[in-house]
Amino acid sequence: MISELSNPSVLMRDPQKVEETLQSMLKAGSNTLQVISDFDMTLTRFAYKGKRCPTCHNILDNSELISQECKEKLKELLNTYYPIEIDSLRSIDEKLPLMVEWWTKAHELLVQQKIRKELLAVVVRKSDAMLREGFQLFFDHLNEHSIPLLIFSAGIGDILEEVIRQAGVFYSNVKVFSNYMDFDEAGVLRAFKGELIHIYNKREGALLNTGHFQELRARPNVLLLGDSLGDLTMADGVHKIENVLKIGFLNDKVEERKQSYLDSYDIVLVNDETLDVPNAVLLYLTGNK
Ligand code: TMP
Ligand code: MG
């Protein structure tokens, strides 16, 4: 049906179910579709030429806006908590308080750095941030077909927006739920706004934004893209959901995590740095294939 589903990076627990979901979504029409996607390591690359690519937080952490001492503390946090994030032997319940700890400590450190709003664009421009191969088609196609794209990220909204703005794809169909910075009158970071979004509370984040999902109530079919098991709840705010196709990028600790990804994502993409499969699905659902 979609030749890209035979790519070597693609794993599916139940290809028959994927086919049925796709057919049902195709029949409903692309005017009933919305896309909900995670950002870091889902829309952005995990690695390029053997080197890890930065998350929104890493873009700041590695920049000249952060003192050497603070960089070391942030690195220590990353080295402590990232292995916990991807540990397949710990349950989400066990990880959750530790993830809150990570985000809270990291944001406290960033706030101490007196980061200036006007420098964020410079820092993003100088960074190694990279959207996945095929991003242009992904964003352009959704925009051309007026399909809403919600980017739902536990990263930093201001940074994420700058990445997609500089890539020229921050179109009007794109909406972002994320952690936004709060600047004082002088443009200096003083806090983060609103409820913290971390990797395991996206369900709560979705339920706080009922207005958005209410506006999209005529679109009960969802294409969900994520790279963490925490991303699976991003569509929990969708009104009377009819079909959801979940595509998960499995970037790291592949063997240990393969089974849990296969159990929860409909399509698992193993070490795939491209958006080829999501793009092929979108082309299919919009009748371009
Ligand atoms: P996402 O929801 O857009 O994927 O963003 C969450 C990612 O951010 C998650 O994989 C962990 C990462 N992260 C950092 O790299 N550094 C940090 O300081 C924090 C708090 C999170
Ligand atoms: Mg992610």
Image (cartoon, rainbow, N blue to C red):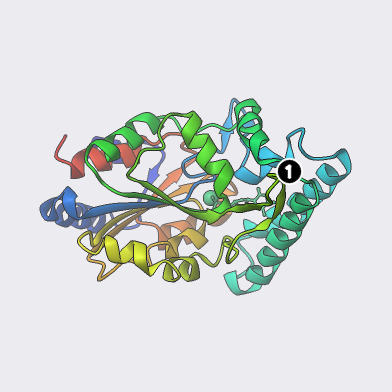
Residue 141 position in % (x across, y down): 27, 35
Residue appearing at x 60%, y 70% in the figure: 91
Q: Amino acid at mark 1?
A: Ile
**Residue 259 locus on image (x, y percent):** 48, 59
Q: Is mark 1 within 8 Å of ligand 1?
A: no
Left or right for 95, reference 139: right
Residue 215 % position (x, y): 28, 62
Quarter assignment of residue 20: bottom left
Left or right of 24 on screen, residue 235: right
User: Could you say whether the residue bearing mark 1 is in a helix, strand or loop?
Assistant: loop
Residue highlighted by disc 1 = 115
Q: Residue furthest front?
A: 185
Residue 80 in sight from this viewpoint? yes
- Density class for disc 1 (Cα within 10 Å; few <14, some 14-19, many ≥20) is some
Q: Residue at x 21, y 40 (%)?
A: 145
Q: How many marks?
A: 1
Give the quadrant of residue 87. Answer: bottom right
Closer to the camera in the image, 288 or 70: 70
